């Protein structure tokens, strides 16, 4: 097989380097460093992709993508408004909502909560809450009934079928006079387990019941939307809101839950920069190994130059020699990174079970496991970055090799 002289010399110098213990150690350390950097960077990016996927799949399947909340008076033409909203291509569905706040009491236990009075059929079109029902049935939500989060049920020590007392503030015509709160007996018909703070604060009741409590006479406080692309929700909400003929506040999920997405992006950026610096440091170990190689091969370089070897041939010989470290490190690191990324959730679960620890708590975060999603574009970009940094590290030592004066070197032999 015919190979260019520079490739032949570069590979030969790589093989001869194994006889030099210190040079071999420096070379191996650079390869290992590049491999570890590539592997960890792929792992981190895959984990961040997994968190973004779960954010869209889980959190935004329950939290509305957008809401229109009445400013002054309740929306009494909400049926017509929903028909108008659902005509837009970016909207999957819309549903009415009445927002209430109150206290839930069971015996001596008391819990403050946010209540969403919803149409049980339309709500399923804008929310995947039924996927998270762990006890009871969503369709049983009718009359004086509630669907509550697992955190609320745990706090009040109640279960499906129990009766609780809902305490609501009473409207008073005289703002200086305190009115006794209204009390309603409610039945728990279902419990949902989503994870995070939502389980601790949120409850659902039928739209008709909420209408009777809030005395809205068939009107609603707002309309909830489910859009096709969650990351375009702010733009979609603004565009549609300007077409409505009611005076409303325009809210989207980025105002209430956007901090989670911003945190993911921040961690992604910081970890990317840190791990890229690790790869850069490992890559520049190539500089040390190549300088030692150039110093060791001065005689060979001088002889090659006297035989008519071009400077480009000599330079490329050492560039190829240095690139071997980058290529090996990038390939091995990418292989390990891909394998670990595809199995990261199972590996972390096995570690948690073996050592009886929990890395992510469902009571704090919206998930209790470490998600992962491998994106081949991240692999390509990471490997390319490692190879580019490795190439840059070889240029100066290889260029210095072309500046060796044959007369001085051969005169000392």
Image (cartoon, rainbow, N blue to C red):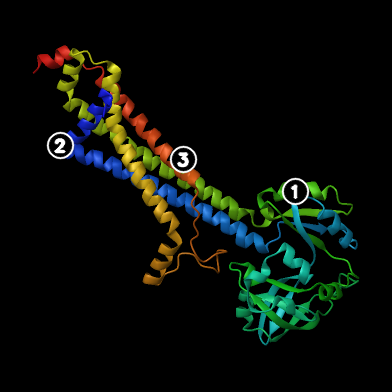
Is 25 situated above or below 395?
below
**Quadrant housing residue 171:** bottom right
Residue at left 48%, top 54%?
47
**Residue 307 shows which numbered tag?**
none
Q: Nearer the viewer, mark 2 or mark 3?
A: 3
Residue 412 shown left or right of residue 383 in the figure: left
| Residue 313 visible from this viewpoint | yes
Residue 263 is situated, as x and y percent measured from the top left of the image, at: 56, 52
Q: Nearer the viewer, mark 3 or mark 1?
A: 3
- Number of the label disc, if any, that sits on residue 381: 3
Residue 159: x %, y % from top left: 64, 84
What x and y, as percent, mark residue 209?
82, 76
Q: Label 2 neighbourhood size at 10 Å, few (<14), some (14-19), many (20+)?
A: few
Q: Earlier in the sequence, mark 2 or mark 1?
A: 2
Q: Are marks 2 and 1 in contact (CB under 8 Å)?
A: no
* Residue 148 to residue 107: above or below: above
Residue 312, image quadrant: top left
Q: CA distance from mark 2 to mark 3?
A: 34 Å
Is any atom of residue 117 visible in this view?
no
The reply to whether discs 3 and 1 touch (Cβ–Cβ < 8 Å) is no
Query: Quadrant of the image for the C terminus?
Result: top left
Q: Position of residue 346 (x, y in %)?
A: 43, 64
The residue that mark 2 highlights is 20
**Considering the numbered disc 2 on the image, is that residue within a helix, a strand or a loop?**
loop
Q: Is residue 45 left or right of residue 128?
A: left
Quote the CA–CA distance across marks 3 and 1: 32 Å
Nearest to the observer: residue 114 or residue 58: 58
Horizontal arrangement in the rendering, residue 1 relative to residue 162 (left or right) = left
Which residue is tagged 1?
A: 236
Mark 1 lies on a secondary structure that is helix
Q: Which of marks 3 and 2 precedes in the sequence?
A: 2
């Amino acid at each position: 097989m015919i190979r260019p002289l520079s490739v032949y010399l570069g590979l030969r110098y790589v093989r001869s380097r194994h006889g030099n213990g210190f040079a071999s150690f420096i070379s191996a350390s650079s390869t290992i460093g590049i491999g570890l950097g590539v592997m960890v960077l792929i792992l981190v990016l895959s984990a961040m992709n997994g968190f973004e996927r779960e954010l869209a799949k889980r959190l935004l399947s329950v939290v509305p993508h957008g809401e229109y909340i009445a400013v002054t008076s309740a929306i009494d033409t909400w049926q017509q408004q929903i028909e108008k909203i659902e005509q837009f291509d970016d909207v999957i569905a819309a549903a009415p909502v009445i927002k209430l706040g109150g206290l839930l009491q069971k015996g001596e236990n008391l819990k403050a909560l946010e209540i969403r009075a919803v149409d049980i059929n339309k709500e399923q079109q804008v929310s995947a809450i039924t996927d998270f029902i762990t006890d009871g049935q969503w369709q049983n939500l009718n009359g004086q009934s509630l669907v509550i989060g697992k955190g609320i049920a745990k706090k009040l020590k109640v279960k499906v079928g129990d009766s609780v007392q809902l305490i609501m503030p009473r409207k008073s015509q005289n703002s200086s006079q305190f009115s006794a709160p209204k009390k309603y007996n409610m039945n728990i018909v279902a419990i949902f387990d989503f994870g995070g703070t939502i389980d601790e604060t949120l409850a659902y009741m039928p739209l008709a019941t909420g209408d009777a409590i809030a005395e809205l006479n068939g009107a609603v406080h707002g309309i909830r939307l489910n859009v096709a692309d969650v990351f375009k929700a702010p733009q979609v909400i603004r565009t549609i809101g300007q077409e409505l003929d009611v005076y409303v506040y325009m809210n989207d999920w980025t105002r209430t839950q956007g901090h989670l997405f911003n945190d993911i992006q921040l961690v992604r950026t910081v970890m990317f920069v840190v791990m890229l610096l690790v790869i850069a440091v490992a890559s520049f170990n190539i500089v040390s190994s190549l300088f030692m190689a150039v110093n060791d091969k001065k005689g060979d370089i001088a002889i090659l130059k006297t035989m008519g070897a071009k400077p480009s041939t000599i330079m490329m010989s050492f560039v190829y020699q240095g690139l071997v470290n980058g290529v090996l490190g990038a390939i091995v690191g990418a292989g390990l990174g891909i394998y670990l990324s595809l199995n990261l959730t199972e590996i972390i679960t096995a570690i948690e079970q073996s050592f009886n620890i929990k890395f992510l708590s469902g009571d704090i975060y919206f998930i209790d496991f470490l998600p992962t999603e491998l994106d081949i574009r991240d692999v390509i970009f990471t490997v390319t970055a490692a190879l580019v940094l490795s190439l840059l590290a070889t240029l100066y030592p290889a260029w210095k090799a072309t500046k060796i004066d044959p007369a001085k070197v051969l005169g000392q032999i």
